Structure formats: structure tokens, C-alpha cells
Image (tube, rainbow, N blue to C red):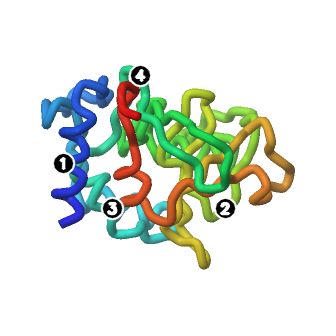
Amino acid sequence: MTNNRFVAKVEALKGQFVYAASERSHKYAGLLRLHTTAEEVAVFERTIGHSLPEDYRNFLCHFGGFAFFHGARFLLKQSRGEATIEIFFGLMPGDPNDILRNWHMSHFGSDGHGNHFVPHDFIPSEFLPVGQDAGSNPICLSIAGTNKGAIYLWVSQEAHDPPTYTSAYLVADSFTEFFMSLKRDDES
């Protein structure tokens, strides 16, 4: 049922999508997607040491990662206004938008392949960056704790060391709620 809702939402957002960076991409419902298998997702879950919420796992397998031409708008639950998602990370080894690369960079300051970076911030350990807003702030899925499954916008300019939730703004209680709330630029 969730996949049918995701497909319907993708149809509603059609024309906003731009690419999935991989030679394994193909056309689906107006967007390019990366084939992500259940086994690839299972390997990813073992690597990060956490299982993904079912709705996000289904989304990742069905759609993979992709970017938007002009972004898709969403509201923040904590009265911080509106933000725009520009990219959903996917399992795309070697691509800057690979979810595992972004998880490594956010938590360890390296991409997991021996390339070290000085990240502009670190995010709480229970956060998995699943996308990025127009200001390069990570959109995170909570993968542990009492808020597992919730989506947060991590505002890098407000980050603290060590990371605290004061830089995290609740967007949705689940990935499905978040994805279904996305609006095209021309929607009110």
C-alpha cells in the first residue's frame, strides 16, 4: 500500500525530478531511478548497524536516490516555516549523493573510502542523512531511539559540538508522512 501511495505522489510531482547518477538508471514515472535491491539495502543496514524503518526501506528499494529540478517544498512541524528538499540520497557507490558516503561524512569526517574531509558539522549518531535541502542542510531519518522513523531538518549553521537536538527541527513523524507532504513549486 505504501509503495502505491509513493507512486501516486511521484506522479503528482512529475516534472520536478532531474536524475539518479548511475549508468544503471532508467526511466520510471517521470524520473530516473537507481535500481536498489533488498539485498543492497540489507548490506547497508548491517554496515550502519541499524535497521531502516519499513516505509523508508520500501522507498529506497523502489525509487533509489534522485534530485529535483527546482526542489519540492515541505513544512516544518516546529513552526520554523518551510524548506525545500533538493535531493534524496540513494545507494550509489562513488557518487557524492551516495547515502553511505553521506553517513560516513556526517559521523566520521570521511567518505568511508580513505578520503578525509573536515565536515562543517556532525549530526547526532541516531540520524541518517537521507537528503539535502536547498541550503545543503541534511534531511535526516532517525534510525534509533524513541523517535525512530521521524524526519528532521538538521540546520548546519546552528550546529553544536557535540551535536544536540537544538539544531534539529522535526519535519514529520515518519518518512511516509514527510514524502506525502512534499509540494511542487507551483502548488499552494
Which SS class for mark 3? helix
Q: CA distance from mark 2 to mark 3?
A: 19 Å
Asked if residue 107 lies left or right of residue 112, the reply is: right
* Residue where numbered disc 3 is placed: 57
Task: Report the residue at 53% width, 71% height from top.
Answer: 148
The quarter of the picture where the C terminus appears is: top left
The amino acid type, in three-letter code, at marker 1 is: Ala
Task: Report the residue at 48% width, 30% height from top.
Answer: 96
Q: How many marks?
A: 4
Which SS class for mark 1? helix
* Residue where numbered disc 4 is placed: 70
The amino acid type, in three-letter code, at marker 4 is: His
Q: Compare marks 3 and 1 and give the one earlier in the sequence.
A: 1
Query: Is mark 3 in CB contact (under 8 Å) with mark 4?
Result: no
* Residue where numbered disc 1 is placed: 8
Q: Compare marks 4 and 2 and give the one earlier in the sequence.
A: 4
Nearest to the eye among marks 3 and 1: give it.
1
Task: Report the residue at 67% width, 61% height from top.
Answer: 125
Q: Which residue sits furthest right? A: 161
Q: Dot 2, crowdedness within 10 Å: few (<14), some or many (≥20)?
A: few
The amino acid type, in three-letter code, at marker 3 is: Arg
* Residue where numbered disc 2 is placed: 125
Q: CA distance from mark 1 to mark 4?
A: 20 Å
The amino acid type, in three-letter code, at marker 2 is: Ser
Q: Compare marks 1 and 2 and give the one earlier in the sequence.
A: 1
Query: Is mark 1 in CB contact (under 8 Å) with mark 2?
Result: no
Q: CA distance from mark 1 to mark 2?
A: 33 Å
